[in-house]
Image (tube, rainbow, N blue to C red):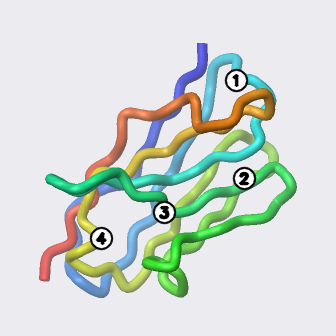
Amino acid sequence: QVRLVESGGGLVQAGDSLRLSCVVSGRPPKISAIGWFRQAPGKEREFVGTSRSDGSTTVADSVKGRFIIFRDGAKDTVFLQMNSLKPEDSAIYYCAVWPYVSGSYDYWGQGTQVTVSS
């Protein structure tokens, strides 16, 4: 069983920063990537960024320059550092695991709420 737990969300003001954490536990398959997604009310889920097992990262254009993804190499833990937050960043943020043997993000956390007030 694979378990993903996100934490670090909260209510902040525009311009503030937050750091989200995603801890993968249980017996995960060999992980190719751990990604971050978000979903705002009434909107589709949106890709935020990903951290790959080769150390590379990608962030979406919508957050580039403000959000950084980094990984604890010793653990299956990925962080999403969010700077210069905007009200439009308000959403539930989810992390997900892409196993090597899969072609998609197969395991998801329950999400953590981020609310940015103007």
Question: What amino acid is at disc 3?
Answer: Val
Question: What amino acid is at disc 4?
Answer: Asp
Identify which residue, 91 or 116, lies in the foreground.
91
Could you say whether the residue bearing mark 3 is in a helix, strand or loop? Answer: strand
Q: Quick one: quadrant of the C terminus?
A: bottom left
Q: Say if 114 sits above or below 89 in the image.
A: above
The reply to whether discs 3 and 4 touch (Cβ–Cβ < 8 Å) is no
Tell which circle, 3 or 4, labels the residue nearer the N-terminal end.
3
What residue sits 64% from the left and 46% below the top?
Answer: 34
Pointer 1: residues within 10 angstroms few (<14), some, or many (20+)?
some
Tell which circle, 4 or 1, labels the residue nearer the N-terminal end.
1
Q: Say if 22 sits above or below 68 in the image.
A: above
Identify which residue, 79 or 44, lies in the foreground.
44
**In the picture, residue 50 is in which quadrant?**
bottom right
Question: What amino acid is at disc 2?
Answer: Asp
Tell which circle, 2 or 1, labels the residue nearer the N-terminal end.
1
What residue sits 77% from the left and 42% below the top?
Answer: 32
